[in-house]
Image (cartoon, rainbow, N blue to C red):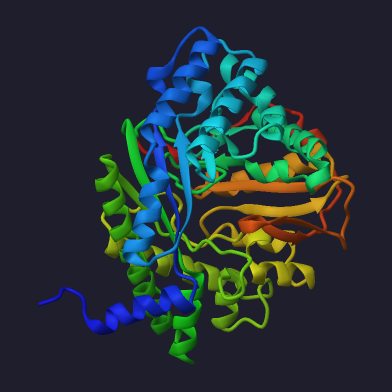
Amino acid sequence: MSMYRNEDILETINMIRNENLDIRTITMGISLFDCVSEDNARLCDKIYDKITRTAENLVKTGEELEKIYGVPIIHKRISLTPISLIGGNSTPDGYVKIAKTLDRAAENLGVNFIGGYGALVQKGMTKGASALLDSIPQALTETNRLCSSVNVASTKAGINMDAIIRCGNIVKELALRTKDQDSIGCAKFVVFANAPEDNPFMAGAFCGMGEPETVINVGVSGPGVVASAIKRAGDCDLSQLAEVVKKTAFKITRVGQLVAREAADRLGVPFGIIDLSLAPTPAIGDSVARILEEMGLERCGGWGTTACLALLNDAVKKGGVMASSHVGGLSGAFIPVSEDEGMIAAAASGGLTLQKLEAMTAVCSVGLDMIAIPGDTSADVICGIIADEISIGVVNTKTTAVRVIPAYGKSVGDSVKFGGLLGEAPIMAVSTDSPARFIHRGGRIPAPIHSLKN
């Protein structure tokens, strides 16, 4: 007797064909600690050899699984040990050489993105981390598939304001260096609080200190599936609505679990986690904002938006953890403006503001993500945006992040267009009141009292 009912199989087929269900990414995490060398050229050679040898069959395996199960696997990606931890005494120029090595390996393997070009500086900054931060603008400008992240805060350590100042300046320089491409360099750089070590999603993916030598982490996605389920449920009460979302998230996660296990077995590496995040795309019918509107909002961004998102995020997590014993990464609802058709429409109409987005990040899975702002926004204001968002993560013991794009030469009324999953976004208004005096006090904002749990 089959373990699957015919109606379950047909329902899954409909999810894939008509509701944009996909495996957003299979991400292979690779430890680079055994590549350490005092000679930069030797370090680059060892890194290239390790990545290309270990991930040799990643893309092929993903393509085979697509054919076997009929589930689209949108991206194949690689996450690495944070490069500042294995860079030794590298100079900024040396780190740029490492960056180009990573990009060359990614191109050779045919993966979409490679992440881990970053540092963990929540409590302080080593010489290696400082040199890597200096290299980020050039590294991301002169590569195509490389992504970078910096963890500037944690609930245990507090907030490193000196690191935030550095990151604000990096964002501005990236915007200038890639001005001819709508400042796309900023889309490959993210600033974190409480960054997870097993996140398969870019630009924040890295292979953390506690991860195996090699590991497979899978990110699933299905905003369209959830929106359709809510629509079918009709005018039920909120408890019933939560049940609908929970059951739908369970089904989505089971598909991811099946693919993840098979990928890990075929590649001969451990299975890590399923990240059950609802990751939208610019495609019609694949939007988190439209889920919120299907729940009863006139427009995403209006009053009630944060409450809808809180219900959605919680129900997604509850359904997902029943479907897999190894749920991790970010796991919940993403609200990247440029990557979500409904968010784009709400922001363009003025219904969704930057302030409302910040409130929404208190109850969802990431933070202020893929938001385009005027190109003349000062570095100090960008630092203030980062500090505010990071504070939400630290105080609430959750992951938050900022990926903001000060589009060079553009202002409110204009838009940026990146194409692909990165989509497009209207330039959103930003208060120009300066937090400079506060920001440049520097130092560390102490950890909150509830961090003392030992």
Note whether residue 118 is visible.
no
Q: Residue furthest left?
A: 1
Place of residue 10 in the rendered image (x, y in percent of width and height, measured from the top left): 32, 81
Residue at x 40% of width, y 25% of height: 50
Q: Taking the image as drawn, is residue 31 in sight?
A: yes
In the displayed structure, 158 sits above or below 419; it is above
Which quadrant does the N terminus fall into?
bottom left
Residue 68 sits in quarter:
bottom left
The percent coordinates of residue 202 (x first, y second) are 54, 46
Corner quadrant of residue 241: bottom left
Relative to residue 119, is residue 253 drawn left or right?
left
Number of numbered discs visible in the structure rendering: 0
Residue drawn at x 55%, y 12% as measured from the top left:
40
The answer to which quarter of the image holds residue 347 is: bottom right
Picture coordinates of residue 316 (x, y %)? 41, 67
Q: Which of 83 and 444 is in front in this view?
A: 83
**Residue 159, percent across and down?**
59, 35
Quarter of the figure that contains the C terminus: top left
Residue 194 lies left or right of residue 168; in this view the side is left
Q: Residue furthest bottom?
A: 235
